[in-house]
Image (cartoon, rainbow, N blue to C red):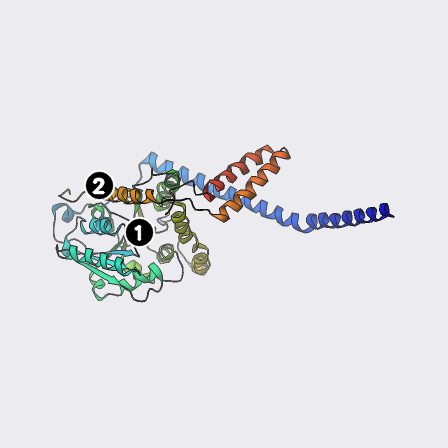
Amino acid sequence: MAFSSSFGVQDAFDAVYSSWVRFRVDYIAPVLQFLADACVILFMVQSADRLILCLGCFWIKFKKIKPVMKENQDLETGGKDFPMVLIQMPMCNEKEVYQQSIAAVCNLDWPRENMMVQVLDDSDDPTTQMLIKDEVQKWKETGVQIVYRHRVIRDGYKAGNLKSAMNCSYVKDYEFVAIFDADFQPTPDFLKKTVPHFKDNEELGLVQARWSFVNKDENLLTRLQNINLCFHFEVEQQVNGVYLNFFGFNGTAGVWRIKALEDSGGWLERTTVEDMDIAVRAHLKGWKFIYLNDVECQCELPESYEAYRKQQHRWHSGPMQLFRLCLPDIIKSKEPLKPHRENSLPNLDAISKEESRKQKELKKKKKHNRIYRKELALAFLLLTASARSLLSAQGIHFYFLLFQGVSFLLVGLDLIGEQIE
């Protein structure tokens, strides 16, 4: 009797397992195979895109192709007919970097009567507001045309901040607007290297400069970011700028023709990637862009994984939403795929490095590793899959999965960048 009972349980187990195997074969396996094939196709498309971009970059270097700035005799002789330039500095709770950035912008080599600086402070910390306001007042007393703006209702984040600033009555007196985020420090000759490209080129709507990073060698995380972003600027932006006259605006370190912004509908709060949004709408309106790979604007990379993750969330949460919003306009568009001083200034680099050194010395006293559960969970999954691949003698999968698993393990244990307080 016991033998029969045991035999019956075994039969039931075998039947259930056989049903599960058939279900996997009929329903789960086809879906997984489709997803795997889709990933392979996407990988091939991305690889082909990267190859074409690299070939384009090689050709640009080989032929020494770059935008040519037309001679402007007035700028060279220090004449009075400089274009009117509005400079916007959107910031929010930027207590660590506001002084250096405001100083860099106020020291731009441009006639002060032809330049207006808007410090667009969205800070919700009263102490930070007071510090930034005092800094603005200090520069105003030196003769710089600079204003401090703070919104009580912070709708629309950065896009809403810029949109609000463009509604000021005096904006109509300016032809161009340069935008610098709070952690960007342009060199004194930035405007002289960018604004002249607009001369006698009425179709030009944007001139974008390249980013450079003062802390690129700080740790492994900053070195990896530097590699990734250098490819973006050196290859993607440069190739698209030369061959398509279009690329995504990077949100800062660029100069816009105000007429182009107004013609494109201005800043909209409908997505978190307001810079990409305005670039797409401007291109659909027929405006051309220029990317200057040899004009750099310094900034800092996130040194901790926590700061990096927040930055990447901001950068990647809006593109698909923007694609859905802009797709009808892109389809209807008739745009073709291809287009036809040195003076006595403070040492801003030294000041920035000194401030960074002080901040790091304070941080080193109180630091601990933070645990990121999602990254650790993915590391566990990948390492488990790599072990299973090794046991099943699929070596090529083992090495790939092992590398990915170890990478996520290091990130999950906060060992890749600077730890946070």
Tag 1: amino acid: Thr
Tag 2: amino acid: Ala
Return the residue nearer the eye: 221 or 79.
Answer: 221
The residue beneath circle 1 is 252
Residue 217: name its quadrant.
top left
137 lies above or below 360: below
Q: Is residue 292 visible?
A: no
The percent coordinates of residue 127 (x first, y second) are 26, 59
396 lies above or below 80: above
The percent coordinates of residue 44 (x first, y second) are 52, 41
Q: Is disc 2 placed on a helix, strand or loop?
A: helix
Q: Which mark is residue 350?
A: 2
The percent coordinates of residue 251 (x first, y second) are 33, 53
Q: Is residue 380 visible?
A: yes
Using the numbered discs, state the Cα–Cα distance from disc 1 to disc 2 in whole angstroms: 23 Å
Residue occupying the point 11% across, 50% down = 79
The percent coordinates of residue 99 (x first, y second) are 22, 51
